[in-house]
């Protein structure tokens, strides 16, 4: 459901290892976020079998994505595209440990950041509008590559905000 504060919230999503199931949110202009964004995923997995496991993604390599697994490293990343160029903040925590983790990616118009369990792990400078696309948004799957770029494990929550939340405000206890 899309909230009155321009956020989108999902909770209680459970993906079985080996399944390609996910939630596909049909294109909605409220999710075509181009200035500031915060993506939050609460998840648990013991194995990230897919090198580009998606937590939240609009399009494929087109707009914004919070990945549970960046290039097979078992650590998350926040990626945005500005003018067709990718900007990635890559975390260092191995989240494929069977424990609950909260992954937060933000873009405030100047920096792309990734936080794991409330701790900022990386930041990269970027400025400009996030590329606008009219693709669906996927939770746990890539909306354009559902059979190859998917997440296996549990996603307990997923939030999309059209603003950048501060480190303290976006931490969950």
Image (spheres, rainbow, N blue to C red):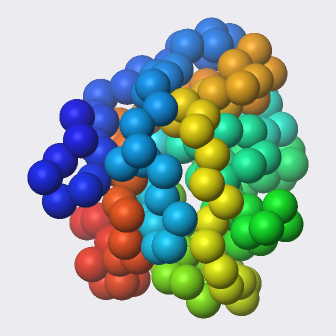
Q: In which quarter of the image is the N terminus?
A: top left
Q: In which quarter of the image is residue 141?
A: top right
Q: Residue 148 placed where, x, y %?
A: 80, 21
Q: Can residue 44 be seen at all in this image of the molecule? A: no
- Identify the residue shown where x is 60% and y is 34%: 135
35 vs 112, nearest the viewer: 35
Q: Can residue 129 be seen at all in this image of the molecule? A: yes
Q: In this view, does 89 lie to the left or right of 15?
A: right
Q: How many labels does the image show?
A: 0
133 vs 118, nearest the viewer: 133
Vertical order, 103 against 42 (above or below): below
- Identify the residue shown where x is 17% and y is 47%: 3
Q: Residue 111 placed where, x, y %?
A: 62, 85
- Identify the residue shown where x is 67% and y is 60%: 131
Q: Quadrant of the C terminus?
A: bottom left
Q: Residue 149 placed where, x, y %?
A: 75, 29
Q: Residue 37 placed where, x, y %?
A: 46, 67
Q: In which quarter of the image is residue 29?
A: top left
- Identify the residue shown where x is 53% and y is 65%: 34
Q: Is residue 124 left or right of residue 118?
A: right
Vertical order, 19 against 42 (above or below): above
Q: Is residue 32 left or right of residue 83?
A: left
């Amino acid at each position: 459901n899309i909230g009155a504060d321009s956020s989108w919230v999902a909770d209680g999503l459970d993906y079985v290892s080996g399944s390609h199931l996910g939630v596909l949110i049909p294109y909605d202009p409220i999710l075509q976020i181009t200035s500031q964004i915060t993506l939050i995923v609460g998840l648990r997995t013991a194995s990230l079998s897919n090198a580009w496991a998606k937590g939240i993604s609009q399009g494929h390599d087109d707009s914004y994505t919070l990945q549970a697994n960046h290039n097979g490293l078992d650590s998350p990343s926040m990626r945005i595209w500005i003018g067709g160029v990718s900007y990635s903040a890559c975390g260092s925590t191995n989240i494929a440990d069977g424990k609950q983790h909260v992954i937060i990616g933000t873009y405030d118009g100047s920096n792309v950041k990734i936080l794991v369990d409330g701790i900022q792990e990386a930041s990269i400078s970027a400025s400009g509008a996030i590329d606008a696309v009219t693709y669906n948004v996927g939770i746990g799957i890539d909306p354009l590559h559902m059979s190859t770029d998917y997440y296996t494990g549990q996603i307990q929550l997923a939030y999309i905000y059209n603003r950048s939340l501060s480190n303290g405000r976006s931490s969950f206890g």
